[in-house]
Each structure stands twice: as structure tokens, then as C-alpha cells.
Amino acid sequence: MDAFFAAIEQRDNPTLKNKPVIISGKSKRSVVATASYEARLFGIRSAMPVFQAKQKCDHLVIVPGNMKKYRAESKKMMEIISHFSPLVEQVSIDEAYIDIKGCERLFGSPENIARSIKKYIYNELFLTCSVGIAPIKFLSKIASDMNKPDGITIIKRSQVKNFIFSLPIQKVSGIGKSAMKKMEILQIKTLGDINKYTLPILTQKFGKMGQKLIALSNGIDPSRVETNYTRKSISSETTLSKDIFDFETIKQMILDRSQSVGRELRKKNFVCENVFIKLKFSDFSQITRSKKLDTSICSSAAIFNEALALYKKVQLKKRIRLVGVGVTALKDKNTPVQMQLIQDQSRQKKQWESVDSAVDSISEKFGTHIIKKASLSELNYRRNSDAKNSN
């Protein structure tokens, strides 16, 4: 979808049309969730701090996000897509892969299918999208970003070799800043340049990614459209009202985020086997720390204990502006697990899960903020006091 959140707000509020709009949180220190194409002309992009966005555009319109509305529109969009093929893989709230092999008899050529999808989405939702068509999944993703907004890009099988040869290496998913530094040393500028090196050299430099890069550089991508998508992680983060160094405040933030993650984990009927924290500092550098657990958990208390233990190992040298907690290695809660040898820990774990279930039921009926830890009430008091003092 094209600037999905911003496009929905511009559709629903005509006064926002043709104006530079960003979707963001209410805090002065929030970041841009989505920028309209009018805002992007000023160099504004997703994940940019709002204060920087305002510096780039003095008449920028900031709209608080409404995830409930965006999820509802996403569901409608996915329903439209599913009419054209049963093989749909939703990879985010506004993006999906579609395998259209064998659908030509019903809907025509790949280009006709793309135009029909775009037409239906616009007629039903009054929103535009961009479509990429390619013989392999990897290239369809790249093609979908090439002619935004409201575009169609087709990479035919006969064009794959030349396209890959000239594709900038930074466009390949998984190539981050660290990998790019190595690419520069090796003078790898395009995906085609990968073929200058052997597998042992690429494996030495990039690990498992080396083998994948060789395959992609030769137009090989065996990955399929996965209809049974399994969520891989759940996380929650918050940008603080001011940079802090205070242990107790950060501890309460970790507790707050752990409760949010735990609640979502239980709502999806998952347990996790890995916990991680994310810290962003005053200079915008960031780190993550994670731990693989000996047993699966879903209680907020257990997530908090693991996250706090990770934080205590960080040698803090700079003030913190963002705190995040997350979990990975998710499994269905009903998956059989090995019996624990230490029964006291098992009983304690079940007790906390019972408490969480009771709190979840109350929150579901009356709202997530109707019941909270006493320490978090103190945190809210501090936030309100800080806001009054800043005003």
C-alpha cells in the first residue's frame, strides 16, 4: 500500500489532502510512523524523530495514529487480494505476496491481474497501492517499491539476469550497515558483483548470508508464498519524554513494556523461548540484548525478570531515550513441553500465569489501563509531573 496510515487519514479527512502529513505518537519525542508523499518531498521518512521532521517542514501536519482503524482497512485489503488467488502471504499490515501461477485463465495476464487488484482496492477503499511482478519472490518485493505511488513494475524472466546485474546491493533485504561496510571494502556495488567472489570468501565475510547472496545473484530464490504465516516476534517500545539515566525509572519502563508484550503473547495463545531488550541512547545509537530461555514462558512477570536481568548487564554510559522489550521463538501455548525437574518453579510459573489471565480478562472488559501495578501508577505520576513542569 502507498503511505498506508497517512493515506487513510487523508481519505477520511479531506482537509489533509495534498498536505504534508505524518502519523506519529502524541509525545514530542515520538518518531514518524508513516509520511505522506507530500511530506516525503521535504526529506521526511519513517522512523525519523518528529522534531527533525518539523525542522524540514514548518507546515507539517501531525496526526495521532489509530491502529484499530488501520487494522480494519488492512483486513479489507487482504480480503480483496484473496479473491484473485488462494495463495496469499501477509507480511505486514500493508504488504503481501501473492502467487498467481495458474490464475491466468480466470483473470488474464499478470499485468491484468495487477491492474484488477489495484482497481478493486481503489473502488472499495479509495486507497492506492503499488504492485511488483516477477518470476521469483525476492524480485517481486523490490519491484513493488520501484514505481511508488500507484505504480506497476514488471520484471520478466528474460530480464532477470540484467536486472540483478545492475541492482544496487543495498536493495537486498538483510544488508545492513555492517554488511555494507564489508561490501565497500570488497568493492561490491551491485548484486551482480557478488559473482566475483567464491562461496568460501563470502561465507567468511557474511556467514550464512554468503550462500544466500550467491543464489540471489544467479536469480535463484526457492522461497514460496507461505499461506500459513507464523508470527515470529512480539515487541513493544516507548520513547521517553526526556533522556534518562535513572535506574528505577528505566526499570518501571521495562515493567510497563513487559506487561504489554505479555498481554499480546497470551492474547495470541503463544509462549516464547527468547526475550530481548532494545535501548536507544541520547545520540540515537542503539543496542539490543537477548537471552534464550531454558523453558517457555508467557507471564508478564517472567518476561520482566528476564528483560531486567539483560538490562542490568548493560554498562550504561549514555542517557536513554527509548526502551523496548520483545520476545521471539514463539510457539503455540498448547505445544507439549518436557516436564520440569524443579516443581517449585513450575508452580510459581503457573501461579503468575493465572494472575495474568485474570488481569487480561478485566482489561478486555474495561480497558488496559483499568488495572495496573502500583509501581506503574508512580511512573504515571512522574510523567504527569514532568509534563506540568515542562509546560
Image (tube, rainbow, N blue to C red):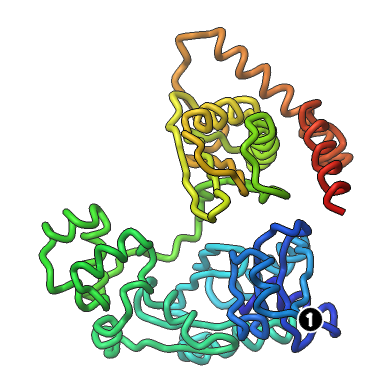
Q: Is residue 131 above or below residue 355?
A: below
Instruction: Judge whether residue 330 can be spotted in this image.
Output: no
Q: Residue 280's spot in the image, x, y percent?
A: 55, 49
Q: Residue 32's spot in the image, x, y percent?
A: 65, 66
Which residue is rendered at x = 55% and y = 12% of the image?
345
Q: Identity of the amino acid at label 1? A: Arg
Which residue is rendered at x = 59% and y = 44% of the image?
320
Which residue is rendered at x = 53% and y = 62% of the image?
91
Q: Is residue 314 above or below residue 235?
A: above
Asked whether, in this view, residue 171 is left or right of residue 184, the answer is: right
Mark 1 element type: helix
Crowdedness near tag 1: few (<14), some (14–19) or many (≥20) residues, C-alpha within 10 Å: some
Decide which of 304, 287 is in the foreground and name it: 287
Asked whether, in this view, residue 71 is left or right of residue 84, the answer is: right
Q: Is residue 103 above or below residue 159?
A: above
Residue topped by disc 1: 11
Which residue is rendered at x = 87% and y = 54% of the image?
391
Q: Residue 37's spot in the image, x, y percent?
A: 64, 83
Instruction: Judge whether residue 125 can be spotted in this image.
Output: yes
State the quadrant of the N terminus.
bottom right
Decide which of 29, 258 is in the foreground and name it: 29
Looking at the rendered structure, the number of numbered marks drawn on it comes to 1
Asked whether, in this view, residue 208 is left or right of residue 308, the answer is: left
Res 367 quadrant in image = top right
Q: Residue 11's spot in the image, x, y percent?
A: 79, 81
Decide which of 194, 27 is in the foreground and name it: 27
Q: Is residue 304 above or below residue 244?
A: above
